[in-house]
Amino acid sequence: MQNFVSFLKDESGASAAEYALILAIIGAGVGVAVFSLGTAITGKVKTATNCLKATSTTASTVCKG
């Protein structure tokens, strides 16, 4: 128990393992953001492509807003 208390009171600098953990968390966040934005951008590009391919008679239903 005494070792655990001394570990909690230790105020020395961060070790390489702590830096690796921070880097992993940031990397996972960036990965999730890129995946989400990539999916959203792909959807918008597909919508624009369909709108450009549409004829003038079907453009009103395909190209919204």
Image (cartoon, grey):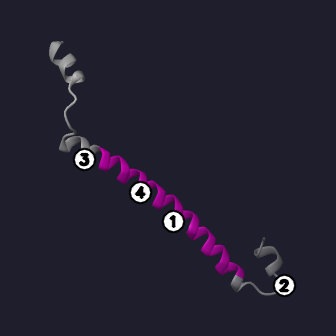
* Disc 2 to disc 3, C-alpha distance: 57 Å
| Residue linked to disc 4 | 31
- Considering only vertical position in the picture, is 52 above or below 65? below
Q: Which residues are magenta?
A: 22-51
Q: What residue type is disc 2 on?
A: Thr
Task: Determine contact: label 2, label 3, CB under 8 Å.
Answer: no
- Label 2's element? loop
- Considering only vertical position in the picture, is 37 above or below 45? above
Q: Name the quadrant containing residue 18.
A: top left
| Residue linked to disc 2 | 57
| Residue linked to disc 3 | 20
Which quadrant does the N terminus fall into? top left
Q: How many marks?
A: 4
- How many residues crowd around disc 1 within 10 Å: few (fewer than 14), some, or many (20 or more)? few
- How many residues crowd around disc 4 within 10 Å: few (fewer than 14), some, or many (20 or more)? few
Q: Name the quadrant containing residue 22.
A: top left
- Label 1's element? helix
* Disc 4 to disc 1, C-alpha distance: 10 Å
* Disc 1 to disc 2, C-alpha distance: 31 Å
Q: Does 63 sit left or right of 24 as displayed?
A: right
Q: What residue type is disc 4 on?
A: Gly
Q: Does 2 sit left or right of 26 as displayed?
A: left
Mark 3 or 1: in front is: 3
Please tell me which of labels 4 and 1 falls first in the chain: 4
User: Horizontal and vertical percent for residue 48?
Assistant: 66, 77
| Residue linked to disc 1 | 38
Residue 61 falls inside the magenta stretch: no
